[in-house]
């Protein structure tokens, strides 16, 4: 259970491990404000009945809100060196490489892949199916890029200009576009 004051009400989140007595005590000891209740787990009928009865006895207005989807913020892994052939970095979050990713090296991330240097090895962003992930590099020269389940192979001829680029999924395929100035 979590009880906190918001601007115009008390927000009460029930997780399913509360007892009727805990609800009653918490409401009696809280300020006289309307209640906004969010049920986040399997809550027994006894607990809900106690909540309704206690709110009525205290003369409090009661509103049920749908559960909020908690946003999980995955960590960012920073690699502070070049990645050489045979090296592999894998993370559920975003990976930032402060250096080059050389041919034969791999960076696999559940989030974005950001290379502050040359990307010539394999980069797989959104490895767990996140199509909104992107690959960013100061110089993008990889033979293959992967975003979620999409794969892009580099053209045979080298790029005509060397500038920061971003790879992302648009309309079901990986596109590469300039970014920055």
Image (cartoon, helix red, strand yellow):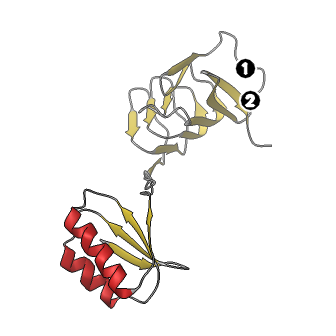
Within 10 angstroms of label 2, few (less than 14), some, or many (20 or more) residues? few
Q: In this view, does 132 lie to the left or right of 84?
A: right
Instruction: Please report the residue visible at 33 percent of the width from the left and 85 percent of the height from the top.
Output: 57
Give the SS element for disc 2.
Answer: loop
Q: Residues within 10 Å of mark 1 (few under 14, many from 20)?
A: few
Q: In which quarter of the image is residue 67?
A: bottom left
Identify whether 95 is placed above or below 9: above
The image position of residue 87, as x and y in percent, is 39, 32
The reply to whether the C-beta atoms of the residues labelled 1 and 2 are less than 8 Å apart is yes
For the residues labelled 1 and 2, the Cα–Cα distance comes to 7 Å
45 relative position to 98: left or right: left
**Relative to the observer, which residue lies in front, 7 or 118?**
7
According to the picture, the residue beneath numbered tag 2 turns out to be 162
In the depicted view, which residue is nearer to us: 7 or 93? 7
What residue did someone put label 1 on?
Answer: 159
Image coordinates for residue 115, horizontal then vertical, percent: 57, 39
Residue 17 showing in the rendered view: no
- 90, above or below 58, in the image: above
Q: Residue at point 58% right, 35% down?
A: 134
């Amino acid at each position: 259970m979590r009880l906190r004051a918001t601007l115009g009400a008390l927000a009460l989140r029930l997780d399913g491990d509360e007892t009727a007595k805990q609800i009653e005590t918490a409401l009696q000891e809280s300020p006289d404000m309307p209640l906004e209740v969010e049920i986040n787990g399997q809550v027994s009928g006894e607990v809900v009945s106690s909540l309704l009865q206690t709110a009525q006895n205290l003369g409090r207005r009661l509103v049920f809100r749908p559960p909020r989807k908690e946003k999980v913020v995955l960590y960012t892994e920073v690699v502070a060196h070049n990645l050489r052939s045979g090296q592999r970095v894998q993370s559920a979050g975003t990976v930032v490489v402060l250096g080059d990713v050389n041919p034969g090296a791999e960076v696999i991330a559940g989030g974005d892949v950001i290379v502050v240097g040359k990307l010539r090895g394999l980069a797989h962003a959104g490895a767990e199916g996140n199509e909104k992930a992107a690959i960013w590099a100061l110089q993008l020269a990889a033979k293959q890029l992967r975003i979620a389940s999409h794969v892009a192979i580099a053209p045979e001829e080298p790029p005509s200009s060397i500038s920061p680029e971003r790879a992302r999924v648009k309309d079901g395929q990986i596109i590469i576009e300039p970014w920055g100035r």
